[in-house]
Image (tube, rainbow, N blue to C red):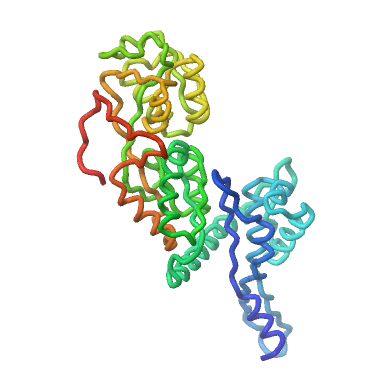
Amino acid sequence: MSSSAREQRRTTGIAIAPIAGQLLHGRSRPAASRLRSMAAGSFATARPEPREPAGRPGSVRGAVELNLHRLWIFMQVVEHQGFSAAAQKLYMSQPSVSNQVRRLEQSLRVPLIDRSGVRATPTAEGEVLAEYGKRVFLLADEAVAAVQQVSGLVNGRLLVGGSTTVATYLLPSLLARYRAAYPGIECDIFAGNNEAVQQRLLGGDIGVAVVAGAPHAGQLQAETVLEDRLVLVAPPAHPLAGRAGITPDTLHGARFLLREPGSQTRELQEQVLADWGLDAASRSDVWGPEAVKQCVSAGLGLTLISEHAVAQNLASGTLAVLPVHPAPRARPISLVRRRDRLLSPAERAFATLLRTLPDWPPEPGEPPPAAPTDAAPDDGPRT
């Protein structure tokens, strides 16, 4: 085999470096080491133009090469809207990132990034390439998952996305069970509100997630695995604490603390207040369930929050439930994945474990939550 043929063969490998995102527990391996471990993979394509008739000058169009390493760097520039931000994310220098993108543009013979503004934005050609790039790396992820199915669950890594409440109060105890069954699998959690988790799923950064409610994107598939209810909580010294038969009319004049926009809990809080005829009630936004609980304890207002988020607070007496009739309806806890993505063995094992849970597992030292006395009737079997 000639040296040129060997070189062409060497440059047709595929390597990927998916970024896991922000993690609640632990951090992913630095992106720089991932990129260094990537092969200098590329696709080379050539489309010869018809030669001119004999005796006339002719030409053959050269090969157009798509280097996957440079494609990944380009996609980070697009995602972070700048070379410096992408360099920081990739643990590279800014000139190096700029050089790799410029070489990609040279190989494709089109401008990919508009550098005239404050932010780096993709050109029309760049937008097309970015969309195909997502599909390329998603397909590469699936290829790795298919190969891993052969080796089983001896070792590997599991990244699970979770909406804030689920990631904080369900996934830690669930992943402890998972690790006990598969000690060779390292586990990471991406935590965010439903909107952030959905974007990570659609972008291919995570393969499986557990969220409160159900996603809206048609590309995602949701399966109800558990249920959760919101309860109205107040400080123990609140005038209504300990009273029975509380109605929405009793709550006129109260101030309500709501989760941030983009949270599924926020959507349900607004729905419950509307059902209670309290649309015009005074309200404030607070980001995250723990911050909400602290604000309630400080006397800043009342809140509707997951029964599982306050189980330990109720047991210790730092918060009190106000049993309002009618009580908020149950919401589903959903296992979510992309419809077109093949799950890895580690992800499939996680999904199987989640499906076997008869109920939300309590945290260590936490008593099982009691069902509200005014709970709405069951809507039927889980789907």
The residue sitting at the front extreme is 365
Q: Is residue 211 above or below residue 338?
A: above
> Residue 248 in the image: x percent, y percent?
31, 14
**Is there any visible trace of residue 59 in the rendered image?**
yes
**Which residue shows up at 39% across the image and 58% down it?**
349
**Number of marks:** 0
* In this rendering, position of residue 319 left or right of residue 322: right
* In this rendering, position of residue 102 left or right of residue 330: right
Judge by depth and name the residue closer to the eye, 78 or 226. 226
| Quarter holding residue 69 | bottom right
**Which residue shows up at 73% across the image and 42% down it?**
117
**Which residue shows up at 63% across the image and 76% down it?**
46
> Residue 77 in the image: x percent, y percent?
67, 51
**Which residue shows up at 26% across the image and 21% down it?**
326
* In this rendering, position of residue 112 left or right of residue 206: right
Judge by depth and name the residue closer to the eye, 333 or 361. 361
Judge by depth and name the residue closer to the eye, 160 or 14. 160
Q: Is residue 117 above or below residue 43?
A: above
The quadrant of the picture occupied by the N terminus is bottom right
> Residue 238 in the image: x percent, y percent?
41, 11
| Quarter holding residue 268 | top left
Q: Is residue 67 above or below residue 250?
A: below
**Is there any visible trace of residue 219 in the rendered image?**
no
| Quarter holding residue 106 | bottom right
> Residue 364 in the image: x percent, y percent?
42, 39
